[in-house]
Amino acid sequence: MDKVYIEGLTFQTTIGFYPWEKEIKQTLVIDLAMGWNTASAAENDELAKTLDYAAISEAIVEFANANPVDLIETLAERIAAFLIGKYQIPWLRLKLMKPTAVHNAKTVGVEIERGTTLSGQAL
Ligand SMILES: Nc1nc2c(c(=O)[nH]1)N=C([C@H](O)[C@@H](O)CO)CN2
């Protein structure tokens, strides 16, 4: 299956388990791969037939800011469900990183895959 990518989507939002984390914004970074038939858009050079990575990037940031949660697991799951429902994405892999959470680690995070390919296989 073809894919549309967003890599290194970086934004500030409220996220975290501890009370002090609910008073601040922290940096999150998302890498996202979305299964899609890119040939359909390419056939007649039509933005409307592809996944608009600019619109999806904006939607992710807006969603995260409107849905503050404790765990990055929860946010990853909710973003995945939101994108699959809103854009009819058959399969996606979402990596959500919280680079400032552990001072001596470059980054920490979770990676999830949801949905299936058109042939019913996870990629
Ligand atoms: N697997 C996870 N571990 C931790 C999370 C998380 O979301 N998923 N969150 C925290 C705290 O919020 C942390 O980021 C504060 O520094 C700890 N562990």
Image (cartoon, rainbow, N blue to C red):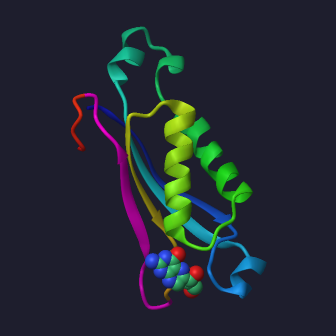
Image quadrant where one finds the C terminus: top left
Figure quadrant of residue 34:
top left
Magenta span contains residue 104: yes
Q: Residue furthest top?
A: 44
Does residue 117 sit above or below 27 in this rendering?
above
Does residue 86 sit above or below 40 in this rendering?
below
Figure quadrant of residue 3:
top left
Which percent across, then down, holds residue 33?
38, 45
Which percent across, then down, holds residue 119?
22, 29
Q: Residue at x 64, y 72 (%)?
A: 15
Magenta span contains residue 109: yes
Is residue 91 visible from the viewing direction of this image? Answer: yes
What's the magenta region? 103-118
Which percent across, then down, holds residue 66?
73, 55
Q: Residue at x 64, y 68 (%)?
A: 69
Image quadrant where one finds the N terminus: top left
Is residue 101 visible from the viewing direction of this image? Answer: no
Q: Residue furthest bottom?
A: 104
The mark tally for this picture is: 0
Q: Residue at x 62, y 77 (%)?
A: 16
Q: Residue at x 28, y 34 (%)?
A: 117
Does residue 24 sit above or below 29 in this rendering?
below
Q: Is residue 120 left or right of residue 45?
A: left
Which percent across, then down, holds residue 2?
29, 32
